[in-house]
Image: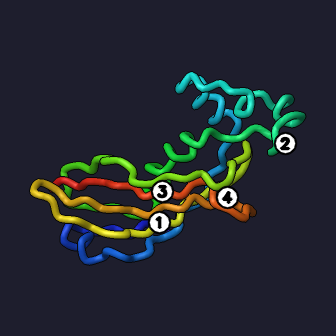
Amino acid sequence: MPPVVFNDIEALKTAAGRELPTTDWLTVTQDRINKFADTTEDRQWIHIDLERARKESPYSATIAHGFLTLSLLSHLVKQSVGVHGVRMAVNYGLNRVRFPSAVRAGSRIRAHVKLDSVKELPDSVEATLGVLIEIEGGEKPGCVAEWLVRYYP
C-alpha cells in the first residue's frame, strides 16, 4: 500500500489519531545483522554465531540486535507516511521503546504506524508516531516504540 502523503504541515495536524498504512515486509538477513554488529562493535554470539546460537540460545537461531530493529523505523515509516512542503524532518527521539520478542535472522518484519499526536512548536511541529514492528508469524511484536519527529517548514 502506498504511503499517506500530507501536502503540508496543516494537513498533517488534522490527521492526529489516524492509523497509517502498514508497510511492506522486510527480511532481516544474517548479513544485515553481521553488518550492524560490525558497525556498532556489538558482536555478541547470540547475533553472529549461528552454530552456538543453535545449540545454546533459547531462540535456536541468531537474532537481530534490538537496536537494529529500532534503527529500521526510519526506513519502514517512510513507506507509511510522507510530509511534503517541509524543509526537513528530524528524528527528535523516543519516549518509550520495548522489544517484546526477538527477531530471528531470516524473519520478515513490517511496521504498523499511527499518528498519535501533532504538537505545534515555535519553529516546527512535533509528530508523535506509535510504531509496532510485527514479526511475520509471531505472537508478539519485535519492537513497540513511541517516536518523535519534528517537521520544519
Residue at image mark 3: 145
Kind of element beneath mark 3: strand
Q: Which mark is residue 91?
A: none
Horizontal relation, residue 25 to residue 47: left or right: left
- Per the model, the C-alpha gap separating discs 2 and 4 is 16 Å
User: Considering depth in this image, is 135 or 147 the residue closer to the camera?
Assistant: 147
Residue lying furthest right in this view? 55
Query: Quick check: marks 4 and 1 in contact, CB under 8 Å?
Result: no
Query: Quick check: marks 2 and 3 in contact, CB under 8 Å?
Result: no
- Per the model, the C-alpha gap separating discs 2 and 3 is 26 Å
Three-letter code, disc 1? Val
Kind of element beneath mark 2: loop
Residue lying furthest left in this view? 122
Residue at image mark 2: 60
**In this view, the mark in front (2 or 1):** 2
Query: Quick check: marks 4 and 3 in contact, CB under 8 Å?
Result: no
Q: Earlier in the sequence, mark 4 or mark 3?
A: 4
Residue 64 location, quadrant? top right
Give the crowd class for mark 4: few <14, some 14-19, many >=20 residues within 10 Å: many
Three-letter code, disc 2? Ser
**In this view, the mark in front (2 or 4):** 2
